[in-house]
Amino acid sequence: PKAEPGDNIGFNVRGVEKKALKRGDVAGHPDKPPTVVREFTARIAVLQHPTAIAAGYTPVFHVHTAQVACKISQIVNKLDPKTGAPVEQNPQFIKKGDMATIVVTPTKPMVIEKASEIPQLSRFAIRDMGMTIAAGVCVDVVPAK
């Protein structure tokens, strides 16, 4: 058997109790440990939302197997859905059908990677009110200290 980056696997670690590990924990190579982030920049596509999304909104981000409430601290720009080029800087809000670059601040420690480095650990869904409101990919990270 062989696991590739992004695969979900199970394994036992001698000396570590099962209850010491929780859903969303990430294991990695000691030479390049997983990145726990203070904040990250992402590109998202808003799939559905009853109103609009503004800075300060704190939905749940589903990243690999983790579920973490994260605050959208800044909407950097709106993107053209066809080309991905920026069309509006610092918009007040984004809504259904919009693509945008956002800055995200997790409410607790979370691992996410840049799409350019480990694409499988860069993808996420944003959920709120029992529905998936957006999907996205991490493009940059600010590691936690």
Image (cartoon, grey):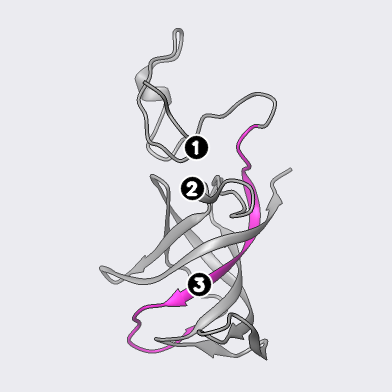
The quarter of the picture where the C terminus appears is top right
Q: Which residues are magenta?
A: 33-53
| Residue displayed at 48% across by 66% down | 136
Q: Which mark is residue 137?
A: none
Q: Secondary structure at mark 1?
A: loop
Q: Amino acid at mark 3?
A: Ile
Residue extending furthest toward the left: 130
Q: Which mark is residue 44?
A: 3
Q: Is 126 left or right of 107, judged from the image as shown?
A: left
Q: Is 68 left or right of 90, judged from the image as shown?
A: left
Q: CA distance from mark 3 to mark 1?
A: 22 Å
Q: Nearer the viewer, residue 15 or 35?
A: 35
Q: Nearer the viewer, residue 109 or 115?
A: 115
Name the residue tied to disc 2.
120
Residue 5 at x, y = what percent?
Answer: 49, 37
Mark 1 in CB contact with mark 2 (< 8 angstroms): yes
Counting residues from the N terminus, which is met first, the one under dot 3 or under dot 2? 3
Q: Which mark is residue 5?
A: 1
Q: Amino acid at mark 2?
A: Gln
Q: CA distance from mark 1 to mark 2?
A: 7 Å
Q: Secondary structure at mark 3?
A: strand
